[in-house]
Image (tube, coloured by chain):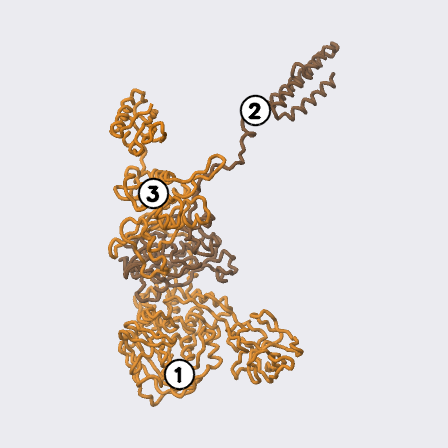
Amino acid sequence: MKDRIEGLLAKIRESAANLSTEEGLEQFRIAFLSRKGSIAQLFEDLKTLSADEKPSMGKALNVLRQTAQSLLDEAVENLQREKKSGKDVLDITLPGRAQHRGHMHIVSQTIEEISDIFRRMGFSVADGPEIETDHYNFEALNFPADHPARDMQDTFFITDSHLLRTHTTPVQVRLMEKYQPPIRAIFPGKVYRNEVISARSHVQFHQIDGLFVDKGVTFADLKGTLVTFAKMYYGSSLKYRFRPSFFPFTEPSAEMDISCYLCNAKGCRVCKHTGWLEILGCGMVDPNVFSFVNVDPEEFSGYAFGIGIERTAMLRHAIDDIRLLFENDLRVNHQFN
Amino acid sequence: MQLSLNWLRTYVDLPESLEELEALLTNVGLEVESIEDRRDSFKDIVVGEVLTCEKHPNADKLSVCTVSNGADVSTVVCGAPNVAAGQKVIFAQVGAHIEKLGFTIDRRKLRGIESAGMICSSSELGLDDDHSGIAVLQPGALPGTPIARYLGFDDVILGIGITPNRGDALSHIGTARDIAAATAGELRVPTPELAECPDPEPFSIDIRDPELCPRYSGAIVRDVTVTDSPDWLRKALTAAGVRPINNVVDVTNYVMMEIGQPMHAFDLELLEGSSIVVRAAEPGETITTLDDEERRLPERALLICDAVKPVAVAGVMGGQHSAVSTSTTSILLESAHFNPSSVRRTAKMLQLSTDSSYRFERGSDPNVTLWALRRAVQLILETAGGKLRGLYDAYPSPVLEKIVALRPAFVNRILGIEISASEQRRILEALQVRILGEDDAAFQCSIPTFRSDIEREIDLVEEIARIHGYDNIPVPTRIEMNVGTRFDDQAFPARLRNLVLGFGFDEILSSSLVSRGRAGVSGEGGTVVDVLNPVSKERPSLRTSLLPSILEAIDLNIRNGMPSVRIAEIGHVFAAMEEKNFTERNMLAFAITGNAQERSWYAPGRESDFFDLKGVLHQLVEALYIDNDTIFYYDRTSTLSEHVLTLEVKGRYAGQAVEVSDAILASFDIGQPVYYAELDIDLLCEALPKRQRYVSVAKYPSMTRDLAVLVAKDILAEQITRTVQLGNPAYLKSVRVVDVFTHGSIGKDRKSVAFTMTFQADERTLTDEDINDSVDAIVSALKRELQAELRA
């Protein structure tokens, strides 16, 4: 009897392990727990045993029945839980309900990213008109008439006195007319140059210019701010250099180069094998510019800088043709953001 | 500007390595843009002398030559038609690599005769495109000289970017001067050696406009022999990027590249009279310039004339007629100083830029003309022979050195460092600024006349900064900031952009310049603004609306096979109101075309319609919380469509949403509906609430009541909802159309409109009785105003 009980227990455990369907459960119940099931059969046979054996075997049989019942209950519960989670009816591999997702233009992304760095350094953000006067675009920025400096910026003229701004720098004049120092602002925007459209140049592009005018602003301050910007934007391990340059509206003037991050300054086509990438122009505001807006250069000094957006974005994202930025082929736009 | 390292070295000691020199020049503001090290080029290629030259016994077109390299003689088989005994040639010896041809010279048999080398053409060395035969060198060429040295290729060519303010640096001496200053080295400027001319020929120089020509110096040299320049001169010029022409012209160019003074040589026999007149052009005057073009001279262009006619455009280009040629025996050399603006204006109007105009525009040194003249005469006597027959100098009002006061403390105040007064003085003196005296803690600086760019104290600050080195100005570890007035003009456009991106639009950026025909599409008021000098005749006009840009992008992307295009642009639009009065508005535009929904397992595909656009527009306005001042109109007109939703803010046009008319779409080759909206960003910004205030939320539940009415088909949904709200029915909070239904069973001229109304009270929970009066009033208003019939 004992052997039969143990044999049946093994069989019950084995069957219970494979219970995964409702039919299986029912078969299990019928086979072991029904009135004509194997356990009932053993209870029937219990009657034939001697009085010595009966109590212990009866106890063992009861344990067997309880075990079978609890195994069945557990299986039922498992099956119900599975049903509830819907594992067998929900195909979660079907595609989800799609929402449209907009992509920011890479030029806007670049402007926003750079602007945010300067916002965090306490710069306000200003706008200005794209149709400018010769006064704001050139005269007040110390470009004398008939000076070769004007050749640096081929100009679209609207009238003899109006033009499409060739840089965002005129906004600094407007700001200095409107506000008393301290003035700490950047001014992003679209600018125009009368150039033949090619992979390298376009009739329009974007710049961010910046200005800080206050008492005691120095060239060292200029370096401090721009180096901080460059480290925040390009990474804190970059190498940099400032070298003398020329802009009519700054004196001294400089250009800032960073070590070429495309070739780790080993020299490549993009950095023209110099290991350096030019990232911005800058300098101390020229006293002549101050004199146009009645700021006393003995009391105040300031720095100004300008960053080309397309160049920055193209270098960063390995875009080799500026025309791609303004064609609006969405297969290009979708590659960013 | 192109400089020869060997040439530069004659005036100043250079740093050991090229890297150091490059860093030095770039750090003083003479940016090294390229370095071409030619010293290793043409290895094993030398000057050879053809000793004998005979026909190849086995080939008609080949010759068998013996060629000497100065030490040994080799047999060379040559195929060139022009090879001959006695020539000096380019001789590639065994082992030489001919890069252009991609092979290395080896001994090999040609038709039975072993050839040990090759006689080259100049094209085979990549020097030019002359394929006609081997290059025949100057008879004086020394056999065995490495060809690189013979050609002046044993040199390093520096490409320097000179900023427009640094006219003084446009020469070897000019650059050497900065190097000397930065290295505290010695600048070696040669002194022209020239015997006096005891009995000068009578010759006069008449400057009619001393403002445009402050100085004109000239020299007459007779009995010159015009021929090719000697090797050293050709080499020097070639290295500096100037094409050798003949010894006289080459000398003038050499002096220009040496000291920066442009010069010109006239054939004296071709000048009439014995005078030079410098005057402004008269209306309609013409001259044929050296490049063989007859040019009409702009008014006020400065001319160099002989006694009768113009012979040169001052500072720009000489005339063809009096050009120096091989038959020239007498020359007049010109070394003058012209007004930079005048030269620039003239060159620009003639669309002509020459080495000469380039330098005059940037300011030449009025006080170097005589030095240059003497130097040129000296070199001409050396290279072309002849006799100096007179030196002439018209200098009506000599240009004096400017005096500029410099406070060493000001330098440190601007730069933010401490450079001692003595170091500042050293730098200035190294730049040939003379310190006349020191008073009130300021230097009185006398500025050399070659530095026309230095006029003010701040200009001297830059000089000190660049020679001291920008990199030696320390970077502060803390940023000074004093923010002043705060503003952020980009914050609102950026917020709008983010909202529109969130609604699933891709941002585009397009050219503001569009075609004349498209520029005016959809512009509100004013006329199209054109640029006077467009780069492309197809796109000369500024857009008055973003619509043309949006439609061009849609057209492109449809053609690229995009099933759905949702794009947005933020940009300025332009219009002219009257002469020289332009308006410029910052606009946001967005448009939808194609699929609103792709076919999928959960829904069939759906084409976009107007309500996709309208929904976005409303959500956008809602997101800005400006509803109090915003009104939508359905009864305005638009040039874009007969169905237009107009947005007004504070009574001003602030935007519209339309289904673009077929006519406009056709003009952009678009064959599917496009839904377009535009908004005036600045107007929307003005209407933004200054501050959003909390309003307590309703404490009591709302009730809804649905009604359906039958109305004539032409009654608009807006009319129904307005009628419902007529007279402000008690407790009515909102009304929303939920169904529109037409069917034969309700009559073909009628439609059923169902709407749901929400009622709510602030002070208590409403009951049915509370709103029955309102509902009755609404029903009767609908009956009265719209002849509506209540559906059961």
Of discs 3 and 2, which sits in the foreground? 3
Chain under numbered label 2: A
The disc label shown at residue B377, or none: 1
Which is more N-terminal, label 3 or label 1? 1
In the rendering, at what x and y percent does residue B723 appear?
A: 27, 30
Q: In this rendering, do the residues under marks 3 and 2 share a single chain?
A: no
Q: In this rendering, do the residues under marks 1 and 2 share a single chain?
A: no
The disc label shown at residue A80, or none: 2
| Quadrant in which the C terminus of chain B appears | top left
Residue A330 visible here: yes
The disc label shown at residue B658, or none: 3
Inter-mark Cα distance, 3 to 2: 55 Å
The disc label shown at residue B519, or none: none
Amino acid identity at mark 3: Val
Inter-mark Cα distance, 1 to 3: 79 Å
- In brown, which chain? A
In the rendering, at what x and y percent does residue B767 appear?
A: 32, 20
Rendered shade, chain B: orange
Q: In this rendering, do the residues under marks 1 and 3 share a single chain?
A: yes
User: For numbered disc 2, what is the local secondary structure?
Assistant: helix
Image: B500 above or below B265: above
Q: Are marks 1 and 2 in contact (CB under 8 Å)?
A: no
User: For numbered disc 1, what is the local secondary structure?
Assistant: helix
Of discs 1 and 2, which sits in the foreground? 2
Q: From the viewer's perspective, tell me whether residue B656 is left or right of residue B63.
A: left
Q: Are marks 3 and 2 in contact (CB under 8 Å)?
A: no
User: For numbered disc 3, what is the local secondary structure?
Assistant: strand
Quadrant of residue B473 in the image? bottom left
In the rendering, at what x and y percent does residue B677 appear?
A: 35, 44
Quadrant of residue B332 in the image? bottom left
Task: Sort mark 2 into few (<14), some (14-19) or many (20+) by Cα contacts within 10 Å.
Answer: few
In the rendering, at what x and y percent does residue B416 appear?
A: 38, 59
